[in-house]
Amino acid sequence: MLSSMVGRVGSFKKMLATSREFSDFVHVPIFTINIKYLKHPYPMYRINSLLTLLLALSSASASAVVYEQDFGNSTGTFNTASSNSTDFIPSTQPGGGEQYVRIGSGDGSWVLQPSTLSSGSGSELLATASSSSSRNKFAIYDFLDSTSLYQMSFDVEFSGGTDGSWNFVFGNGDGGDNDFAKTGSAISAAETFANIVFQFDAGSGMTAFSNGTELLSDPFSQDIEYRVEIYANNSTSDATYNGGVNTVVAGSYDLWVDGLLVGGNLPKSSLANGIAIDSFTFWGQDSTGNGAAITLDNITYSTAIPEPHVICLPVAICLFICFRQVRRKPSNLEL
């Protein structure tokens, strides 16, 4: 990253050398500074130092890699019992991980269809759970640049079942035999950071569990669309997000549903401290008549917890330096 950053500063140097004022504007991330009112010649060492600092801090604040699976615009059905497919689901962007869907021996289906969720566009993924303990499973695993901090969000709706369950598990298969990559397997505790179980009940009821403990807020019901967000911390120190407003302690995760914190600092499962989180899976099972359905769309997963407040530091530094050089009023700085 450092060599790339130095190269970018070098490009600025060449541009600056061709003109005393070089431009009326210098552009840096998220703001623009009007420099035509600065004293000239503006000392080159200060410009170089400022640009280097801004680029370094901006790069640090943008170090997280965000992947997306929105299922494109494809349509189709995969429902062959006791089989799996690695190309039924549209590919993610490079580095976004390997993926597959599987149908167990208890029937059911995976369907790519035009979006029915209000937040969706293009296609969505609709699935029905297996009627037996042989899982119907969708997984994305071994995505690149993963860290011990993890953020994920997705749109989801549950429907149609009076029994059975859907599990959502995330962690790292390197903690065991990589059960994320094994199409028919559950995920061992050693590979699991969290296992959220959505249990279908009679009527439209549902009960949710995190690593075996019931979520007392009962945040889910059938036939309602939800936006779920996960902020997970498998490091050995606390982490903040949302501009430092929220803290997720080491070895835990926060669960948000439609913008409400329904589970704060929920304890993790048995994934070893410091292990990166690089895989997740959804699987459904034990549903009479394959009734328990799940609809998914707009899945995003990040290799770190975003920290929007980090970008404020380069802004403040730049403004401090520039204000000291301005001959006119501060209003000549265009933000």
Image (cartoon, helix red, strand yellow):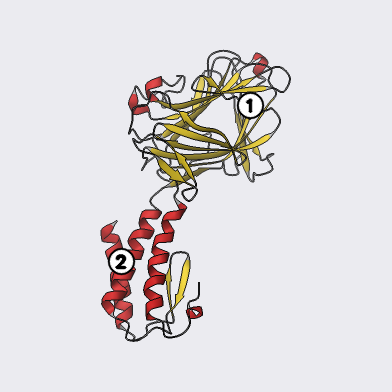
Q: Is residue 247 above or below residue 134?
A: below
The image shows residue 277 at horizontal and vertical percentages of 39, 34
Please tell me which residue is depicted at 38% across the width and 67% down the height of the picture: 317
What's the residue type where badge 1 is placed? Asp
Q: Nearer the viewer, residue 143 or 37?
A: 37
Whether residue 138 is visible here, answered yes or no, is: no
The residue labelled by disc 1 is 218
Q: Quadrant of the N terminus?
A: bottom left
How many numbered circles are shown? 2
What's the residue type where badge 2 is placed? Thr
Is label 2 or label 1 in front?
1
Please tell me which residue is depicted at 67% across the width and 15% down the height of the picture: 289
Categorize mark 2 by other alpha carbons within 10 Å: few (<14), some (14-19), many (20+): some
Categorize mark 1 by other alpha carbons within 10 Å: few (<14), some (14-19), many (20+): few
Nearer-N-terminus badge (2/1): 2
The image shows residue 294 at horizontal and vertical percentages of 62, 29
Q: CA distance from mark 2 to mark 1?
A: 50 Å
| Left or right: 297 as drawn, with respect to 20 | right
Examine the image and state in which quarter residue 208 appears: top right
Examine the image and state in which quarter residue 97 appears: top left
Secondary structure beneath disc 1? loop
Whether residue 38 is visible here, answered yes or no, is: yes
Please tell me which residue is depicted at 60% across the width and 44% down the height of the picture: 73
The residue labelled by disc 2 is 52
Q: Nearer the viewer, residue 226 or 103?
A: 226
Residue 269, label in figure: none
Secondary structure beneath disc 2? helix
The image shows residue 62 at horizontal and vertical percentages of 40, 54
| Left or right: 159 as drawn, with respect to 280 | right
